[in-house]
Amino acid sequence: MTIHSLPVRTDAPDPTPAEKPAGRGGRRLLRQRAGRQHHAGPLAYVLLVIMAVLSIFPLYWTMVAASTDNTRVSQTPPPFLPGPNLFSNLARAWDEAAMGKAMINSLIVAGVIALSTVMFATLAGFAFAKLRFKGRNALLMLVIGTMMVPPQLGVVPLFMMMSELGWSQQLPAVIFPTLVSAVGVFFMRQYLSEALPDELVEAGRVDGAHSLRIFWSIVLPIARPAMAVLFMITFVHAWNDFFWPFVVLDMTNPTVPVALTQLSAGYVRDQSLIMAGALLGTLPLLVMFVVFGRQIVSGIMAGAVKG
């Protein structure tokens, strides 16, 4: 029996560079290339510095204006260096605007509104994103449609309602109309639609968990980054809200924006005193961001990483 050998090809193509075993020099080159991809160029640093300066300048100018007198602020060109009257102007603004009580009221109002908005918006967002029920799309369109209505249209009937309830000139009149927002519901619905897999909800159903159990054990840990962002945005908005608190409250029980109107009363406005009051009203927000900013940013970055 004759054994025929198979022909051996001598024109086989060379292995591609990806198929070749990488030596020590090749691995070093790959590490260097990968490292260079994470370094920003000089132009990026210049743009970041410019944006940082533009963002910090209004706060710096507020501090400069609050540290001088009214005559110096009105001069041309205006001062660009802090003056010696910062603490005296802050003390005057604190006494004349009753900032102590106003800050406590704003803290209560903003804290309650932010917490309730986060909780209710997360519940509604989970329902609209993952639960199946009749009229879901119609209700979602109705919620989104309320965002198109100017809030000024509801001031008169809302004020009449607060008066009938006996809440006029009281903090509940500011808190209850804004316990939840359509923007927050839509924001949480969009986030949970992408971040919450349907398989996790179905696994909870298989294990016998009801909707509230699934919400507490599965949805809340996943929604934590978005909840932190929504809390920060809602808190800042409620703290800075002026129109509705100015309508429903008076100077005996004000929030910070309402209290600051006392500093601008009179024929001649003391701009340095107004800026000192504005600086006092901004400091709690800065402190909150310094304390909780790292947790919020880390939560956002953790929610952005999948797998």
Image (spheres, rainbow, N blue to C red):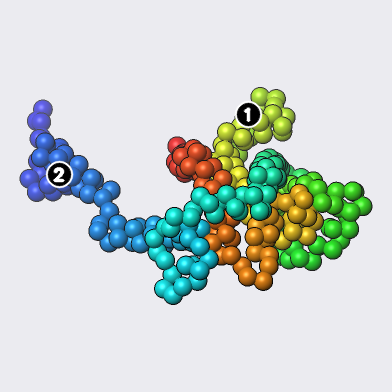
- The kind of secondary structure element at disc 1 is helix
Disc 1 and disc 2 in contact, CB within 8 angstroms: no
Q: Pick the residue in front: 85 or 54.
A: 85
Q: Residue farthest to the right?
A: 164
Residue 97 visible to the viewer? yes
Q: Position of residue 238 (x, y in %)?
A: 66, 51
Q: Pick the residue in front: 241 or 176.
A: 241
Q: Amino acid at mark 1?
A: Ser
Q: Residues within 10 Å of mark 1 (few under 14, many from 20)?
A: few
Q: Is residue 307 left or right of residue 220?
A: left
Measured Cα–Cα span from mark 1 to mark 2: 46 Å
Q: Position of residue 271 (x, y in %)?
A: 56, 65
- Quarter of the image for the C terminus: give it: top left
Residue appearing at x 22%, y 49% in the figure: 36
- The kind of secondary structure element at disc 2 is helix
Q: Amino acid at mark 2?
A: Leu
Residue appearing at x 46%, y 73% in the figure: 75
Q: Residue farthest to the top?
A: 207
Q: Is residue 69 left or right of residue 77?
A: right
Q: Quadrant of residue 141?
A: bottom right
Q: Position of residue 41 (x, y in %)?
A: 25, 57
Q: Pick the residue in front: 162 or 76.
A: 76
Disc number at residue 92?
A: none
Q: Which residue in the structure is indicated by mark 2?
A: 29
Q: Position of residue 171 (x, y in %)?
A: 77, 47
Q: Which residue in the structure is indicated by mark 1?
A: 217
